[in-house]
Structure formats: C-alpha cells, structure tokens
Image: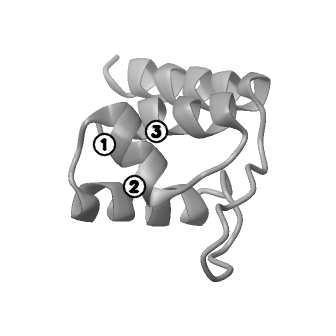
Amino acid sequence: DLGDPLFREACEVVIRHKQGSVSLLQRRLGIGYQRAARLIDKLEQAGVVSAFDGSKARDVLVDQEYLNTVFAGAAERVADESK
C-alpha cells in the first residue's frame, strides 16, 4: 500500500536487516504490535517478504534497487494523474 506513510520505511527496514518480523518493525519504527502486524501483512501482499512460517522471521524477497524502482514508478503515476 504505497499510500501508507510507514510502508516505504517498513520496506527499507526489512531490506536493511535482511529479514522481516513484527518485532523488528516495532523496535525500529517505534510502533505498536497491531500497526507492525498490519505492515508485515502489507509487505507480504506486496511481495516484499515471504509468507508466515511459524516463529521464524520472514525472508526478504526484494532488494533496495527494486524498491526504488517501484516507488519511482508510483511517484510518476501520481504526477501524471495530477496533470
């Protein structure tokens, strides 16, 4: 969800740490459990992290370059829509 103000930051955190978990987002973003859990679900839906597998941290499926491309494309679409 590119409209979520913490989504990109959450993407960058999991890429930087090479794993995704609710507790990682809680600590790094200073947010509560529910907010972090929703972000992890959104990251999974977007294909950024792997599916839930028990208590293991989720694998990160993309890199920073891919993330930059996605957000650059989103910014271009917003600019085109505002014309």
Q: Which residue is mark 3?
A: 10
Q: Residue at x 67, y 56 (%)?
A: 49
- Indicate the quadrant containing the C terminus: top left, top right, bottom left or bottom right: top left
Disc 2 residue type?
Leu
Q: Which residue is mark 2?
A: 39
Residue neighbourhood size for the residue with mark 2, other residues' Cα within 10 Å, grouped as few (<14), some (14–19), many (≥20): many
Figure check: 50 above or below 31: below
Which of marks 1 and 3 precedes in the sequence?
1
Instruction: Report how many numbered discs are placed on residues in the image.
Output: 3
Figure check: 64 above or below 17: above
- Cα distance between the residues tagged 3 and 2: 7 Å
- Left or right: where 83 falls relative to 16: left
Name, please, the residue furthest toward the bottom: 54
**Residue 69 appears in which quarter of the rendering?**
top right
Disc on res. 12: none
Secondary structure beneath label 3 = helix
- Left or right: where 60 falls relative to 10: right
Which of marks 1 and 2 precedes in the sequence?
1
Q: In the rendered structure, are the residues bearing label 3 and label 2 in contact, judged by CB atoms less than 8 Å apart? A: yes
